[in-house]
Image (tube, coloured by chain):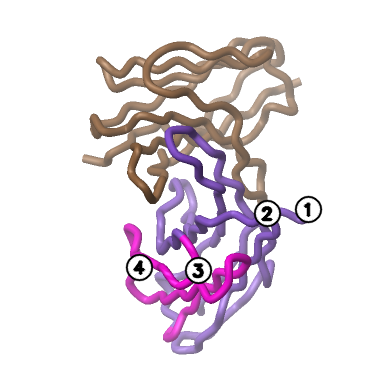
Chain colours: A brown, B purple
Amino acid sequence: QKEVEQDPGPLSVPEGAIVSLNCTYSNSAFQYFMWYRQYSRKGPELLMYTYSSGNKEDGRFTAQVDKSSKYISLFIRDSQPSDSATYLCAMSGTGSARQLTFGSGTQLTVLP
Amino acid sequence: NAGVTQTPKFRILKIGQSMTLQCTQDMNHNYMYWYRQDPGMGLKLIYYSVGAGITDKGEVPNGYNVSRSTTEDFPLRLELAAPSQTSVYFCASILTAPSSYNEQFFGPGTRLTVL
């Protein structure tokens, strides 16, 4: 079993739709939960991060963490064609090396 | 600041050849990382460094070597290239602080093909 599982998609939605992206994990030591966005042929860039359980909102993006279920989600409201990218969830514990464990990524296409 | 830079952008190697992937950051970050990303897969950690002179293995270190002689540079060495090392390689860095989260900044990647 992988430490982090993510549905690879691909996911295709019409412009304006609400998008839900999800990851599950098995390591109880994870405390930091991140979502990275990766455009084609680019490096990942941090979209949002959450510490421990709870919700965090930033504009059209909402990140949710449920540590009891070991489940994290990213919601995108009013999706735009510019949101088309691969979304990677990532997690880390509080260890000194701050290593990240990544999901496999979900490829999202928002159709105009 | 240029952030994290990687060279080359693309490279084709023959089996058995060697090469060094360069990574430089100008943000005075202490931690640096090398990842590889295979198609449809997430990023897997190859090696990391928590400071100059200190390196450690990640999840997939076989076939690679690293060094960290300065804070800015973290080169990745492939000694005997194999087709299984065909991948996109990303370097990342972070300025750590105790009891807080700090973003890992990624470079643009190096696309390597081994034939």
Identify residue type, mark 2.
Met
Of the residues shown, which amino acid type is indicated by label 1? Asn
Residues at marks 4 and 2 on the same chain: yes
| Amino acid residing under circle 3 | Ala
Q: x, y (%) of residue B87?
A: 50, 63
Please state which of the two labelled residues, at mark 4 or mark 3, is closer to the viewer: 3
Are dots 1 and 2 on a single chain?
yes
Same-subunit check for callouts 3 and 2: yes
Q: Quadrant of residue A58?
A: top right
Could you tell me residue B21's position as x and y percent? 58, 73
Please state which of the two labelled residues, at mark 1 or mark 3, is closer to the viewer.
Answer: 3
**As displayed, is residue B54 above or below residue B45?**
below
Tag 4–tag 1 contact (CB < 8 Å): no
Marks 4 and 3, Cα distance to the nearest angstrom? 19 Å
Residue at (59%, 24%) from the top-left corner?
A12
Residue topped by disc 3: B52
Classified by dominant secondary structure, the portion drawn in magenta counts as loop
**Is B81 drawn above or below residue B5 in the view shown?**
below
Residue occupied by mark 4 = B61
Q: Magenta part of the protein: which range?
A: B51-80
Asked if labels 1 and 3 share a chain, the reply is yes
Disc 2: which residue: B27
Marks 4 and 3: same chain? yes
The three-letter amino acid code for the residue at tag 4 is: Pro
The residue under label 1 is B1
- Secondary element at tag 1: loop
Using the numbered discs, state the Cα–Cα distance from disc 4 to disc 2 in whole angstroms: 26 Å
**Mark before the other along the chain sequence, 4 or 3:** 3
- The crowd level at tag 1 (other Cα within 10 Å; few <14, some 14-19, many 20+) is few
Where residue B90 appears, as percent x and y from the top left, is 56, 58
Identified at 60% across, 77% down, the residue is B12
